[in-house]
Amino acid sequence: MFEAELKGNNEIMLTGRFDASQVEKAKMVFDAVANSCEVDFTDLEYISSAGLSVLLVTQKRLSKSGNSLKLTNMNKHIRDVFRYAGFDTVFEIA
């Protein structure tokens, strides 16, 4: 199961497994973000390359207007995925 929930207008909560089968659901939430936003990974168990792609596309879109995504509360496994992909240099990870 996967959930991406927009809290207010500047926080997204991710829950479950973010893989290719969940891309359309996630895109609906991320496409609604127009300003800098915090993405909370507390309850995210897994992210695939398809999930990484959604985040990267959103980051690129936001950066054109001087905004960005801040990724928070990643578990060690997900943080390692971002580091191995080189995404720790693309995103602010707290």
Image (cartoon, rainbow, N blue to C red):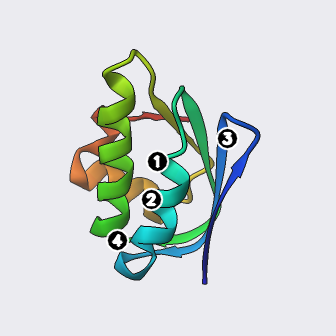
Q: Is residue 81 visible?
A: no
- Residue 55, compared with residue 36, is above or below; it is below
Residue 32: image quadrant is top right
Image location of residue 16, percent across then percent down: 60, 75
- Image point (23%, 45%), residue name: 86
The reply to whether dot 1 and dot 2 touch (C-beta < 8 Å) is: yes
Q: CA distance from mark 4 to mark 3?
A: 21 Å
Classed neighbour count for the residue bearing mark 4: other residues with Cα under 10 Å, few (<14), some (14–19), many (≥20): few
At mark 3, the secondary structure is strand
Amino acid type indicated by mark 4: Ser
Residue named by callout 1? 31
- Residue 29, compared with residue 60, is above or below; it is below
Amino acid type indicated by mark 1: Asp
Amino acid type indicated by mark 3: Glu
Image location of residue 13, percent across then percent down: 67, 55
Classed neighbour count for the residue bearing mark 2: other residues with Cα under 10 Å, few (<14), some (14–19), many (≥20): some
Q: CA distance from mark 1 to mark 2?
A: 6 Å
Residue named by callout 4? 48
Residue named by callout 3? 11
